[in-house]
Every structure is written in structure tokens, then in C-alpha cells.
Image: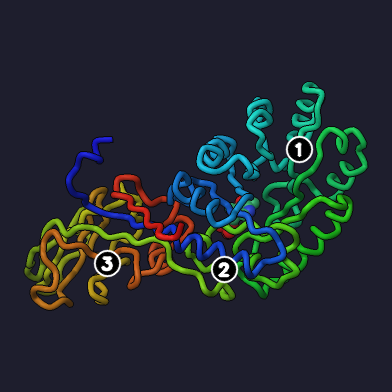
Amino acid sequence: MARSVCPNFSSRIVIDLDAIRANYRAIAARSAPAICGAVVKADAYGLGVAQVAPALYREGCRHFFVAQLCEAFDVRAAVGGDAVITVLNGVDPGCEAVCADGGFIPALSSLSQVERWRDHARSLGRPLPAGLQIDSGMSRLGLAPDAAAALAQDAEFVRRVPLRLILTHLACADEPERAANVDQLAAFRAARSHFPGVPASIANSGGSFLSPDFHLDVVRPGVSLYGVAAGPRAEGLRPVVRLDARVLQIRDVLAGAGVGYGHDYVAPAARRLATIAIGYGDGWPRSLGGRGAAWHGGTRLPIVGRVSMDSLTIDISALPENALAEDDFVELLGPSQKLDMVAHDAGTIAYEILTRLGHRSQRVYVEREP
Ligand SMILES: *Cc1c(COP(=O)(O)O)cnc(C)c1O
């Protein structure tokens, strides 16, 4: 990649693999004796599955969850052969053989997936393990409870498709007081009673921070591994991502100066501005125009005007004269500005900020633990 010959960089993302491992340890300890897996879909929430999955594996994680089959191959290439890799979206038509040959566990989510997987097991003449996803009340993915119960009575299915996991997903896990959580748990408990001996899983990050009733046999946290508090009870997580961008230019403007595309911002008085080298082309949300901020030495520096593809402008008038110079860096994510603050300013959630972080920034991975 051409980037590797660039002697310097415009923006830099530092990903703390030790913090991911510490977050995994914290959630695993909280959820024990349940097994703690790790959701590493969407390139480990944008942070790089090739680096994140091996770090989790070194921490003892042996159950990885992805959304799509292609992602399962990326995990397989990154971790040891003893890891179990489950595909949460199940199996797409025509992918049965590839999924089976790869040794992946599709979380079968509809009757058509069930039929295609069973057909494939029949054609191979050997049992094909799978997971089974039940819709306990989110209306997103999974078999209706009565369809699952019928399947449990289907002797051919039971023989051909040994179930390794039965799972469901919570709609409101990050809101502990919502009645939907206990309703879903009750519906799932009833459904799983038809599958005695099959490990069960309901908890994502938010669910892992609910009462132990929700831990069941396997928890599947994603976002909290990456430092995001899923709900008010998520405590003790370490931040994982730091993002800094370079100051390209500093200028003093007079009252009335228009700044950026469309002159959305017009300086109300003399201001000192800095143009920094990050924009929506780096995944920094365009919706932060006129709303978000960068930080320097604990001072909030508001974004003025629209976010461009490759740059944005901040008002640095609050800083002492020489506190910031061209080619210095300002903080976009780090100790002063948490993911949640950016998500709030951008009108979205931390998940979306993370998964959109661009690949034009230099990426640095830190891991000191063996
Ligand atoms: C994404 C996902 C998870 C992880 O959710 P987080 O909120 O990131 O912890 C767990 N289970 C399923 C089915 C998912 O789609």
C-alpha cells in the first residue's frame, strides 16, 4: 500500500488491544460461569479483525461471532483452529457447502435456512452442526417459538443437524428497566426447554450487564469489548480507541468571514481558526458540522461550518496564543472526548462511529501483554 511509504500521516487511530483484552476479562468475570464469546462482525466493529481476534484468542476467547460467512473466513485466518465461529445471519442460499466445509456454525434463522442446511446434511450423508436462532420478541431474525418447538420434534432434523447453540437477541438490553427484557427471557426459556442439553445464549453487551438470569450458558458481547458502555450498568470498561488529526493550517479571520462550504458559519467576531486533516472521507460524520468538536489540552474546540471530505475547521480562539501550531495534532477521540460524546453530537450511536472509522488514517495497535 502506498501509505506504507508515506513518512508521515494526517490522522492516526491508536487501538489498545490490551484494553480490549481487559474488557473481555471484565465481562467474562461478570458472566462466569457462562462462557464469554466475542462478537467481531463488521471487521471487529471497524477496529480490524485481523488484530482484534488474535488478541481475544490470546486472552482465552474460543467463541467468535460474525454476521456473514465471508467474515468467518477472516476470523479463521486470525485465530487457532480450536475456535468455534458462529455466523449470526445464518447461511445464504448457495453457501451451504462453503459454510460446512469451513467448519463454521450458521445460526439458522428461518425455516428456509433450516431446510437448506438439512438438505445439505442429507446430501453429504453426515450430521452438520448448526446453531438455531429464535425470535423471542425483537422481530428481526429467528424462528418463531412454535416453529422451533415443532423442529425439536422433527426426528430427521435432530439426527441430521446437531445443535451447538440456541440463541436469541434482546431489543432493549441497554435499558435495564424495560419490561421487554424479562418478557424476551421468559419467551426464550420456554423455547429452549424443547432443546435440553443445548447451550443457550441471549446476552449481547447490554445483556451481560443485566442480572445473572440473562447470562445462561454463553454471552456474546460486542461493543463493550471495544470500550462502549452498553447501558447504565456497564462499568469498569477501558477505552480502546484514540484518534488524533493534524492541524493543516491556522488563520485569523475578521468578523463576517465565511467558513467552509456554503458559508454555513460566518464569524460573528474576529476568530482564530484551525483547519484539521480529517473529514467524512475518514468516516468522521458530516453531521458534526457546526455541532461537534476537537479537543486540545482539555479545551473544547468547536467545529465551525460544514465537515469537508478531507478536512474540517475548528475555532481555537479559546486557546492561549501559542498553544497549538500548524502540524500539531488535536484529539477527536481520547481522554477528553469519548465515543459517546461524538455519537451524541452526531445524532447517532457509538457503534456507528466505530464501524465507520476510515482506513485512510494511520492505524497503530498497542499490545504489551503476552
Ligand atoms: C451484534 C450482535 C451482538 C453484539 O451486540 P453488542 O450490542 O455489540 O454487544 C450479539 N448478538 C447478535 C445476534 C448481534 O447481532
Is label 3's Cβ within 8 Å of ligand 1?
no
Q: Residue at x 45, y 63 (%)?
A: 19
Horizontal and vertical percent position of residue 118: 80, 30
Question: How many neighbours does mark 2 have within 10 angstroms: few (below 14), some (14-19), or many (20 or more)?
Answer: some
Q: Residue at x 30, y 45 (%)?
A: 360
Q: Alpha-carbon neighbours of circle 1 within 10 Å: few (<14), some, or many (≥20)?
A: many
Give the percent coordinates (x, y) of residue 81.
60, 39
- The disc at residue 26 is 2
Pick whichever of labels 1 and 2 is earlier in the sequence: 2
> Is residue 262 at least partly visible in the picture?
no
Element carrying mark 3: strand
- Is the residue indicated by label 1 positioned so its CB lies within 8 Å of ligand 1? no
Query: Residue at left 76%, top 37%?
Result: 129
Cα distance in 3D space between marks 3 and 2:
30 Å
Residue toward you, 252 or 133: 133
Residue to which mark 3 is pinned: 294
Foreground of the two, 343 or 231: 231
User: What is the CA distance from the residue labelled 1 to the residue labelled 3?
Assistant: 49 Å
Query: What amino acid is at disc 3?
Result: Ala
The structure's colour scheme is rainbow
Query: Residue 278, can we see it?
Result: yes
User: On the image, numbered disc 1 is attached to which residue?
Assistant: 129
Q: In x, y percent, where is residue 31?
A: 67, 66
> What SS does tag 1 mark?
loop
